[in-house]
Image (spheres, rainbow, N blue to C red):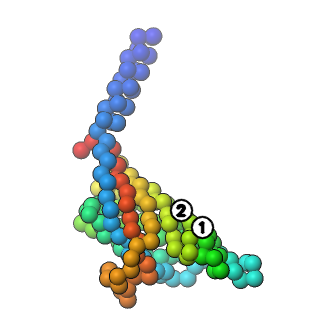
């Protein structure tokens, strides 16, 4: 019985190290064009004599454009935030779905961050779906330069610089 237990442990250790050895990290950069809200938020209120805006469940959309084809995507999000209208500070978090162009599948994930001078800085974690199942991506979003270009009808509400890494543990 003891030998059987040792064999099982050895197999598990080999499988774990084999999977870890096959993981690849691919850095990427890109731009996210925030097309703005697509509808009304589930709940909106203010506190502090109207200085703090609280928004919950606000749908939004945008386009991700990148040097990595696995990040070029149409994106929908559900965002929640608290924004001090006097200072431009506050917090933001939410969920998103990215439908990657030319791929059956995409990304689902979460984001969280803060506002500084009314601009959002966020960290993003995405998990692959469909053809991208078994992959993850991690990225930082920070304000970018709005040149007026981009895929949003009527122009982008915001342009965001993206840098991150895609982790592929599939071993392909």
Query: Dot 1: within a 10 Å radius of its alpha carbon, few (fewer than 14), some, or many (20 or more) residues?
Result: some
Q: CA distance from mark 2 to mark 1?
A: 8 Å
| Dot 2: element | strand
Percent coordinates x, y for residue 65 in the rendering: 31, 70
The reply to whether residue 170 is in sight is no
Disc 2 and disc 1 in contact, CB within 8 angstroms: yes
In-front residue for pair 57/31: 31
Residue 112's tag is 2
Which residue is rendered at x = 56% and y = 75% of the image?
117
Viewport quadrant of the N terminus: top left
Q: Tell me: residue 10, above or below residue 135.
A: above
The reply to whether residue 131 is in sight is yes
Quadrant in the picture for residue 143 = bottom left
Left-right relation of 76 to 91:
left
| Disc 1 target residue | 91
| Dot 1: element | strand
Left-right relation of 94 to 69:
right
Q: How many marks?
A: 2
Q: Tell me: residue 80, above or below residue 50.
A: above
Q: Residue furthest right?
A: 49
Which residue is rendered at x = 32% and y = 80% of the image?
150
Quadrant in the picture for residue 139 = bottom left
Percent coordinates x, y for residue 15 in the rendering: 34, 30
| Between discs 2 and 1, the one toward the N terminus | 1
Which residue is rendered at x = 34% and y = 53% of the image?
166
In-front residue for pair 124/143: 143
Viewport quadrant of the C terminus: top left
Which residue is rendered at x = 44% and y = 60% of the image?
140
């Amino acid at each position: 019985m003891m030998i059987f237990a040792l064999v099982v442990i050895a197999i598990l250790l080999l499988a774990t190290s084999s999977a870890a050895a096959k993981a690849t990290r691919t850095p990427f950069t890109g731009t996210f064009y925030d097309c703005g809200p697509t509808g009304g938020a589930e709940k909106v209120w203010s506190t502090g004599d109207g200085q703090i805006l609280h928004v919950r469940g606000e749908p939004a959309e945008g386009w991700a454009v990148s040097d990595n084809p696995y990040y070029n995507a149409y994106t929908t999000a559900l965002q929640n935030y608290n924004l001090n209208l006097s200072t431009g500070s506050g917090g933001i978090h939410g969920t998103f779905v990215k439908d990657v162009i030319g791929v059956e599948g995409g990304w689902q994930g979460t984001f969280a961050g803060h506002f500084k001078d009314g601009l959002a800085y966020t960290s993003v974690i995405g998990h692959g779906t469909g053809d991208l199942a078994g992959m993850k991506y991690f990225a930082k979003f920070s304000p970018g330069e709005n040149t007026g270009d981009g895929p949003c009808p009527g122009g982008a509400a915001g342009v965001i610089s993206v840098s991150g890494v895609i982790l592929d543990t599939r071993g392909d």
